[in-house]
Amino acid sequence: MGLHNVSVRRVLVVDDEEGIRLMLGDLFDELGYEVCLASNGTDGLAASLSGDHDLAMVDLSLPGMDGLEMLRAVKESKPELPVIMMTGYASLGTALEAMKLGAYDYITKPFDLEDVQLVAERAIERKRLIDENSYLRNELRTRYGFDNVVGLSPDAQKAYVLASKVADSRASVLILGETGTGKEYLARSIHYQSPRADRPFVKVSCAALPEALLESELFGHERGSFTGAVARRIGRFELADGGTLFLDEIGDTTAATQLKLLRVLQEKQFERLGGSETLSVDVRIVAATNRDLKKALAEKTLRQDLYYRLNVVTISLPPLRDRTEDILTLAQHFVRKYNEETGKNIQAISPEGASILQRYSWPGNIRELENCMERAVIFCNTRTILPQHLLFSEELPEPKTASASPTEPRALCEVEKEHIARVLESCDYNQTRAALILGIDRKTLRSKIRQYGLGTQIAVAKLDHGR
């Protein structure tokens, strides 16, 4: 659900003086707000709890439940609702107490209507920003929810189950996987499903910067600490305080940077480059790499103590070529995504296109598949993605050739039998995937398998694979 219509704002005015109520009611009505009026604290509280207001104007001196009591009750149930207290000069002390209880501001009677408008608009704008930030945070939680994981590959499912278990903890996480396997997406999922979700998620690409710039990026620097340092710079550790710092390609860092990272992980402290002030931070580390860290340890290009600090929980993401059962599911997911972005209505991937997608090796993994499907959606002018819409960075392997000469006349049933057998073999005899590629349902495929006597072939293949 999105934000409510920002063109209509709702204001609650609570005051026992009829003249004040009507004057403020007329003011907000002229400004285009919907106005609700109440003459006492009890009615005002009931209105605030039942309505969706953007601001409450509450008099301190109310009959029955006074303004402070109403403020306390409102803040308990609707802490995000800004409340402006109205008071006379004689009760300024009480107004300051109201500020401590969470009032946005106070105005003194008699007041200037321009001042009321200014304070009210500031309070409403602040609530709008809070609502918008809350909405965006919820959107991020939804987008990076573990239930949004696409695919049924056991290795991929295992990775996300492990991530969901570790998300609530403070443990450092090390994500291993080839380029394009979704390491950053997994890191964001861990962050946005953790208690730190309302705090920053900050990314640093360790491979993109030379050592001196990377240290400045991580820890910040003071003015004059090196040539070109014309002003103080806040580093990523400070920016991520209370949240998560994602160190992408951690295996590319130098020994000097690794030593400084180790200190932050151990002591939660560091100094900016060129500075003497010791800074303390509360940052959760999620690191990722596509390198062979065991080889890096053996070659002493990665500190063993840093490795063990990062490696509290290790999650490995499989390459796409090892999760072929997910290729078509992911492809269809990206088609839906780019349908929404482009306004198109592509309904399917042709059997020939599906076969090509499954034959390709996907050296760029999920990232390459997404790029491929985005291009396909852009180029496709029909409701079905065809082979000509698919572009790849590497050459496709040649499909297996039939034993018979292509010019030799053959019965249709023979061609169909051979094609079904070939598709089944390419799918490792997974009938669900084969049916999807063939463009038929599983019931029809099973009927064809019986018709053409392919059951023995399938059984022998499963025995050969130990299944």
Image (spheres, rainbow, N blue to C red):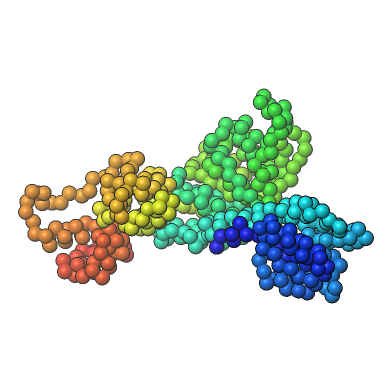
**Residue 173, image x and y in percent?**
58, 52
Q: Does residue 180 sit above or below 73 in this rendering?
A: above
Q: Position of residue 260 (x, y in %)?
A: 66, 39
The residue lying at 52 percent from left, 57 percent from top is 143
Q: Is residue 224 above or below residue 397?
A: above
Q: Residue at x 33, y 58 (%)?
A: 347
Task: List the single residue furthest toward the top.
Answer: 227
The part of the image, by quadrant, that contains residue 276 is top right
Toward the right, the furthest residue is 90
Task: Please name the residue shown 69% across and 35% down the image.
Answer: 233
In this view, the residue in front, 428 or 146, is 146
Confirm whether residue 174 shows in the render: yes
Given residues 116 and 143, the one toward you in this image is 116
The residue depicted at 54 percent of the width and 59 percent of the height is 142
Work out whether residue 347 or residue 129 is closer to the camera in this orientation and state it.
129
In the picture, which quadrant includes the N terminus?
bottom right
Determine whether, in the image, residue 254 is placed left or right of residue 100. left
Residue 463 falls left or right of residue 452: right
Q: Position of residue 282 (x, y in %)?
A: 70, 50
Q: Is residue 456 left or right of residue 166?
A: left
Q: Quadrant of the C terminus?
A: bottom left
Location of residue 82 in the rendering, given as x and y in whole percent from the top left corner? 73, 60
Residue that sits furthest to the left in the current view: 409
Q: Is 395 positioned to the left or the right of 163 in the image?
A: left
